[in-house]
Image (cartoon, helix red, strand yellow):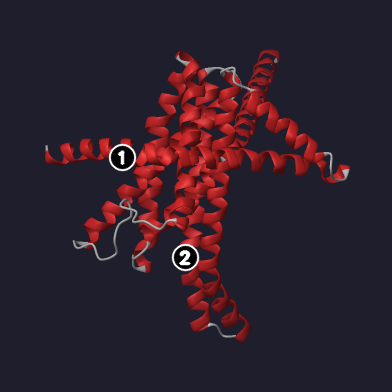
């Protein structure tokens, strides 16, 4: 009997340790995922453009295809690569973060440049592109998954940098939880966004009460403005997060003067308001200065990306297609 009680006590102890480990993984995943907010918002803002022109009945199936592709990107490719980096080449994480941050700055600046100086975006599919609808659906989904791979790489690298030193299994579990949680959050939000106008249209046309019909009409009218606002928030978040990542990377490389100046200026601005608002104002001032730096860096990178990198990538892609 005493042996059975001892066994049960050991099992209970193991269960407590397992529960604590699960709590640690969840807490680390939440913290790491929150640091990737800029890329996450951009992911949700970018994806709906790939659904433009589809029949309403095909929107959710396409989103599901992209969701599966995103999970494959994160779990089968990026997670193992991240674990290898963390355990065998941790010195590469900071440069890769800076590279990802620079890409965020470029994307944000390019969107603003496109608004100020309209130009054709060759990576966007044209509505009148000829071909079989099923083939075009696959092509658009494939394009969205390629874009997702870049954003997912940023998300996973940012998350990896936030995970404290631990064993490889804890890191793997945390990264996997971040990958699944962020994917569900992003594409669940995308599904809600793209179907909101359909729901509103149904309510406006079939509502039994006038208030229901008015609410439906309001939803339909609200969505274009909401999508524009989402794009603005996503662009601002990209510039803020990208700029802060690059500045932090510079500090780690011994070039901390810019980060120190931004911190001091933000603190000075925070002391200009009542104490109750000090923390928020200081954070907002720092985020704004990080974003301004990100915008400046992005504008510098636009000619590099469009005149140097893009032609090289185009030549390689064309060569592969011919082969």
**Residue 274, position in %: x, y?**
88, 45
Q: Is residue 72 visible?
A: no
* Residue at x-position 55% and y-position 39%: 294
Tag count in the figure? 2
**153 left or right, relative to 254:** left
Residue at position x 45%, y 38% from top? 152
Alpha carbon separation for disc pair 2 and 1 = 34 Å
- Residue 91 drawn at (x, y percent): 49, 16
**Does residue 316 appear anywhere in the picture?**
yes
- On the image, the x and y values in percent for residue 169 come to 51, 21
| Residue behind mark 2 | 195
Image quadrant in which the N terminus is located: top right
Side of 248 relative to 140 (left or right): right
Disc 2 element:
helix
For this view, does 156 lie left or right of residue 287? Answer: left
- Residue at 47%, 33% in the rendered image: 100
Classify 50 as above or below 321.
below
Q: Are marks 2 and 1 in contact (CB under 8 Å)?
A: no
């Amino acid at each position: 009997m005493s042996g059975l009680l001892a066994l049960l006590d050991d099992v209970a102890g193991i269960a407590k340790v397992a529960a604590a480990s699960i709590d640690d993984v969840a807490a680390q995943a939440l913290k790491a995922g929150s640091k990737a907010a800029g890329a996450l918002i951009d992911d949700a803002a970018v994806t709906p453009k790939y659904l433009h022109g589809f029949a309403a009945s095909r929107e959710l199936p396409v989103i599901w295809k992209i969701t599966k592709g995103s999970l494959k990107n994160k779990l089968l490719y990026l997670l193992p690569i991240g674990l290898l980096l963390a355990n065998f080449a941790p010195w590469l994480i900071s440069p890769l973060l800076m590279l990802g941050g620079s890409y965020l700055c470029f994307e944000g600046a390019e969107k603003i440049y496109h608004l100020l100086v309209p130009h054709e975006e060759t990576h966007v599919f044209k509505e009148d592109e000829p071909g079989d609808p099923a083939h075009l659906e696959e092509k658009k989904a494939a394009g969205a998954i390629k874009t997702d791979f870049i954003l997912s790489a940023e998300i996973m690298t940012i998350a990896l940098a936030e995970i404290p030193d631990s064993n490889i299994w804890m890191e793997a579990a945390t990264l996997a939880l971040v990958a699944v949680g962020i994917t569900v959050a992003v594409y669940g939000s995308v599904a809600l966004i793209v179907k909101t106008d359909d729901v509103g249209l149904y309510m406006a046309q079939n509502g039994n009460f006038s208030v229901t019909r008015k609410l439906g009409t309001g939803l339909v009218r609200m969505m274009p403005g909401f999508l524009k606002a989402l794009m603005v928030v996503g662009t601002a978040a990209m510039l803020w997060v990208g700029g802060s990542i690059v500045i932090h990377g510079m500090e780690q490389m011994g070039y901390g003067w810019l980060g120190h100046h931004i911190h001091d200026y933000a603190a000075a601005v925070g002391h200009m308001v009542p104490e109750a608002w000090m923390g928020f104002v200081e954070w907002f001032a720092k985020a704004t200065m990080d974003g301004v730096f990100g915008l400046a860096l992005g504008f510098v990178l636009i000619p590099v990306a469009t005149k140097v990198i893009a032609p090289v990538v185009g030549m390689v892609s064309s060569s592969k297609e011919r082969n």
